[in-house]
Image (cartoon, helix red, strand yellow):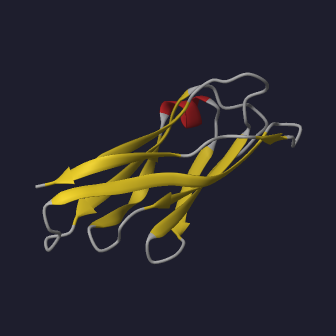
Amino acid sequence: MDIEVSLLPGKGLPPASLKWEVIYPAQLVEFVSPPLSGAATMDAGKSLACAPGRTYSHLCLVAGGRMPLAGGTVAILHFKIRSDAPPGNCTIRIDHIDAVTSDLKAVKLTGQEGQIEIQ
């Protein structure tokens, strides 16, 4: 299954780089590498990289150049439901977000979470 990570345009200067943590229940789903760069990342000429954090998370970074990120899809993350996962809901969360403008000013962004139904 795919999860889109999107940046919504806000007030003030848009970020030029972005770092976040993807938190998921590792006993239910598996992060499948590599993620895909979204249109906002590609249009800004940036690169996307994700690496394992803890057992239940990955850290992702979008960076490169000084061009800001416009609103839109930043990344497409791939997950696989584990074969022994019981039916029910699974929460995937984007959290611990750090973002800076091209002149290195911090941008405050709020994380989000979503539910996946395992059948």
Where residue 47 sits in the image (x, y, percent)? 60, 47
Q: Is residue 1 visible?
A: no
Q: Is residue 98 left or right of residue 79?
A: right
Q: Quadrant of the C terminus?
A: bottom left
* Residue at image point 51% right, 76% down: 54
Q: Is residue 24 left or right of residue 65?
A: left
Residue most extreme to the left? 119
Q: Is residue 15 left or right of residue 9?
A: right
Where residue 49 sits in the image (x, y, percent)? 56, 57
Where residue 52 sits in the image (x, y, percent)? 50, 71
Nearest to the observer: residue 17 or residue 44: 17
Where residue 115 sits in the image (x, y, percent)? 31, 48
* Residue at image point 57% right, 54% down: 95
Q: Quadrant of residue 30?
A: bottom left
70 up-or-down from 91: above or below? above
107 up-or-down from 57: above or below? above
Q: Is residue 106 visible?
A: yes
